[in-house]
Structures are given as C-alpha cells and as structure tokens.
Image (cartoon, rainbow, N blue to C red):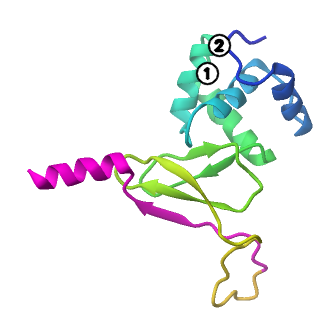
C-alpha cells in the first residue's frame, strides 16, 4: 500500500484516518504521514513533492482534495497568512497561535498565555458567541533578521 519510509507505524496512521470516518487510501496515508514529518507548517506544494517521493506519483488536485478533506474533518488546521500560500498543521484542537516571518514565511506555533479559549476577548462582541481567537504575530526570523542587518551594515 505504501512504499515510503514511515515516521509512525502504519496502523496508527490508518487508525487516525478511520477514526475520522475516512478510508485509508495510499495517498491519504502518505499525506498524513508527510505532514507529521515535515517541519513547520508546509504548504500544499511541499506536501505534494514529498508524497511523490514516497508514492511515485499523485496529482496536484488529489493532494489539494486530501488536504481539504482532512481540514474539514478536523485532522488538520489550515492557516492562511497574508501574502503567503495556505499552510497546514496537524496540531489541532488546542489554544495556540502563529509567529510568521515577513520575509521567508517561516511559521512557528506560539502557545497562548491563557489556559482557556478564546484567550482574547473583543471589546464588543456584537452578540456573537465567541469561541476562538486567531492571532498571528509577524516579524523576522533569526536568519532573515541577520541577513537584513548584514545588508544594512554594508
């Protein structure tokens, strides 16, 4: 079913898919395993490239469809930083935010300092029942900051 090196036992990946009502097809298993192995928050193209390395071939549309399905059933979280492609993560269902480099797009998880969700409250909720706050912190990662500083210094 799956030719690539697994980071987690195959039965764990299959169980995760089935627990969310999904069949464990080779592309789905590969996508879920790739997302568990890639650092940071990969975009669809990075996922597709790694899945192709493992399976030999998979269509771009299939990868997008799988990512969409996984997001819909709660296996993944999709984040859409302004000016960057959508990114995906397997860390779902908790109270965390993101720190994103303006230059290279490196994306890191940042735990919220409040133990409850949402960890921020709007000054006016307009009678909404607020259950989540999404915060994105923007800046420069250490590498991009060093490059910027070096360029300015010359």
Looking at the picture, how far across and down is residue 7, in whole percent? 70, 23
Looking at the picture, how far across and down is residue 3, in whole percent? 70, 9
| Left or right: 127 in relation to 137 | right
Q: Residue at x 77, y 43 (%)?
A: 75
Q: Residue at x 64, y 84 (%)?
A: 122
Looking at the picture, how far across and down is residue 66, in whole percent? 70, 33
Rendered image: mark on residue 55? 2
As rendered, which of 54 and 95 lies closer to the eye?
95
**Corner quadrant of residue 98:** bottom right
Tell me the SS state at disc 2.
Answer: helix
- From this view, report whether residue 122 is shown above or below residue 44: below
Boundaries of the magenta span? 129-154
Quadrant location of the N terminus in the rendered image: top right
- From this view, report whether residue 128 is shown above or below residue 20: below
Q: Are marks 2 and 1 in contact (CB under 8 Å)?
A: yes
Looking at the picture, how far across and down is residue 39, in whole percent? 56, 36
Provide the residue designation for mark 1.
51
Callout 1: few (<14), some (14-19), or many (20+) C-alpha neighbours within 10 Å?
Answer: many
Instruction: State yes or no: residue 12 in magenta.
Output: no
Q: Residue at x 75, y 40 (%)?
A: 69
**Corner quadrant of residue 124:** bottom right
Q: Give the number of marks.
A: 2
Q: Measure how far apart labels 2 and 1 are at the Cα level.
A: 6 Å
Q: Residue at x 50, y 58 (%)?
A: 99
């Amino acid at each position: 079913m799956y030719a690539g090196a697994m980071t987690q036992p195959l039965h764990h990946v299959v169980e995760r898919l089935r627990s969310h009502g999904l069949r464990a097809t080779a592309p789905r298993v590969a996508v879920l395993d790739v997302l568990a192995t890639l650092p940071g928050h990969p975009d669809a193209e990075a996922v597709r490239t790694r899945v192709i390395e493992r399976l030999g071939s998979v269509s771009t549309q299939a990868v997008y469809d799988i990512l969409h399905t996984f997001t819909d059933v709660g296996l993944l979280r999709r984040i859409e930083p302004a000016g960057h492609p959508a990114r995906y993560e397997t860390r779902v269902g908790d109270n965390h935010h993101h720190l994103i480099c303006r230059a290279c797009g490196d994306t890191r998880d940042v735990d919220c300092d409040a133990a409850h969700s949402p960890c921020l409250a709007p000054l006016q909720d307009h009678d909404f029942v607020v259950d989540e706050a999404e915060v994105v912190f923007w800046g420069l990662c250490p590498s991009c900051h060093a490059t910027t500083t070096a360029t300015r210094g010359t």
